[in-house]
Amino acid sequence: MSHDREEIIAQLGGDDAVRRLTSEAKADALEHHLQGKIARFPTAAQVEAQIETRTYRQGVGFLFHNAGKTVKKLQPMPAKPTLKDFFRLRFFHTANHVLQSANRARQNGMQEEVILACLLHDVSQELIRVDHGWWSAQIFEPYVSEKTAFAIRYHQALRFYADPAFGYQYPALYREVFGEDYQPEPYIEATYSMVRNHPWYDLPRLLTVNDLYSFEPGVVVEFDEFTDLLGRHFKQPAEGLGFDNTAVAHIWRSIAMPDHPL
Ligand SMILES: [Fe+2]
Ligand SMILES: [Fe+2]
């Protein structure tokens, strides 16, 4: 069931209420819903005008601000933090979303590299939200296959482009976030063209298909459901993430210790 359809049914009072409507009343309800939607989305210029109304920049990571309110003290990380520790102690804003996406990918019978990409794809947004596909791919690159990193990196560009062959539509959420008339920047367009013609196109595309653009209430997915998959496809460093001297160790430390000023 599409998000739109669910939303209309909910607005009308649920399945039973919809069943009682005449077809004319249903058509009216749909028209009202669509009019409401068009009016609700801002333009790209209106989105830009919001910048100076905030005390933080939209691209800052979730861990680093609390929308103008005070932030909370974080629990310290273990000496050799694992991916699970980061999910438990730092990925407060993104864990639920990526777990639900990975769960959906598994239910849809995706290959394990795609399920893993779904599990990891957005967590860099705890640090920085600008170009989160590139950031997420980068922090995981030393620990996952090239295909998984490819899927993570490029889902960010692909999500702006519909692909009916995969049943992927432009998400309504983006009209809200970027503005109704938003056009992706030239580097996103160039990346899309490159990936569209790449032999691994399916991987990031399947990530966008299994990505969730709205929170699924009541669906709780535990990290431990992916322990076996991670055992097969994620090279957890013995020294802990942040302490293994890879080129990305400092990025993990920045997530682990976001209160360090220098
Ligand atoms: Fe994403
Ligand atoms: Fe996502």
Image (cartoon, rainbow, N blue to C red):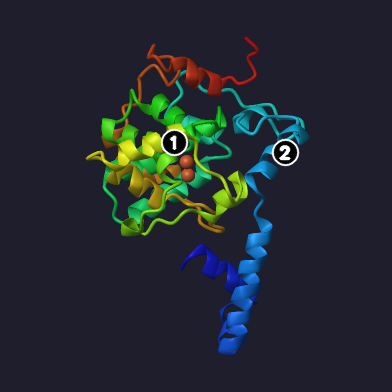
Is residue 98 among the parts visible in the rendering?
A: yes
- Mark 2: secondary structure: helix
Residue placed most toward the observer, 68 or 100: 68
Q: Residue at x 55, y 49 (%)?
A: 174
Identity of the amino acid at label 2?
Ala
Q: Residue at x 50, y 46 (%)?
A: 97
**Residue 250 percent coordinates (x, y):** 48, 15
Q: Residue at x 58, y 39 (%)?
A: 93
Can you tell which mark lies on residue 142? none
Q: Residue at x 37, y 39 (%)?
A: 192
Which class describes the residues within 10 Å of circle 2: few (<14), some (14-19), or many (20+)?
few
Which class describes the residues within 10 Å of circle 1: few (<14), some (14-19), or many (20+)?
some
The residue identified by callout 2 is 49
Classify residue 157 by image quadrant.
top left
**Residue 130 percent coordinates (x, y):** 54, 31
The residue identified by callout 1 is 188
- Mark 1: secondary structure: helix
Residue 18 against residue 236 in the figure, above or below:
below
Identity of the amino acid at label 1?
Ile
Classify residue 74 by image quadrant.
top right
